[in-house]
Image (tube, grey):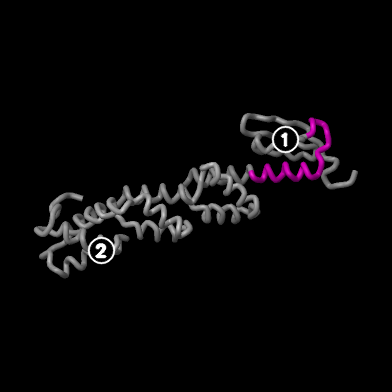
Amino acid sequence: MDGAGADIRLLSLDRGESEARLTLSDGTMLELASSSLPPDLPACGDVVPPALLAALHEAALRKRIARRLFRELDRRLRTRADLRARLLAADFPPGPVDEVLDRFAQTGIHSDRRFAEAWCRDTLRAKPVGRRLLADRLARSGVPPQLARTVAAEQLPADDEAELARTAARAWWRRQRGAADARALARGQRFLIGRGFPPGTAGDAVRATAPGRGVGGGEPA
């Protein structure tokens, strides 16, 4: 018969609720998602047409990529760019890698938005920082800059950012010695700006929490 796969037959099919295993006459065993099984799959013992054989191999490849992705995400939440780089380094081809990553995003399993939201929540629980720091670090990790800014704004509304700035300022003042003079105020503002707070928000927070100057100067962070 003509065609490289024309004489390959389907020997067995074990179909579960989510996964299917196929054994072919050339000794190959393919594992793929049950939903990827083609409706025109031949009966056991029949020849698998070359085009259909290629489609089965592609579906099995996507299944291997998905498994690798789940293993990566079990270890640590990562950006799409990081995951893609790791999969390519493992010799998976770019096309199927992008297909699986797209499907993960469409089904809500993983996306840069989900990564960014989780990263912002974890960071804000650890220490008070501003939107700019959140957005900058997300962008450096591989999240698209516009998405990074959007998620940072969603996770840290303006009122919450101002309160966090005051929390950071109170903690900063407790570590200072000497008078709360103009130079100290300037240093405190620079510190908060370095934490990602806007200059105006930083200045207001430092002045409001300065010992003996504003409300909340002696409150714990």
Q: Quadrant of residue 213?
A: bottom left
Residue 105 placement (x, y as % from top left): 54, 46
Q: Quadrant of residue 58?
A: top right
Determine the residue located farthest toward the bottom in the rendered image: 183
State the residue in front, 24 or 112.
112
State the residue in front, 138 or 6.
138
Q: Quadrant of the N terminus?
A: top right
Q: Quadrant of residue 60?
A: top right
User: For residue 54: magenta?
Assistant: yes
- Rendered residue at 17%/66% (across/down): 185
Q: Which residue is mark 1?
A: 22
Residue 175 placement (x, y as % from top left): 18, 59
- As helix, strand or loop, the secondary structure at mark 1 comes to strand
Q: Which residue is mark 2?
A: 200
- Identify the main secondary structure in magenta: helix
Kindly report which numbered mark, 1 or 2, lies closer to the viewer in this rendering.
Answer: 2
Sequence-first tag of 1 and 2: 1
**Magenta residues?**
42-62
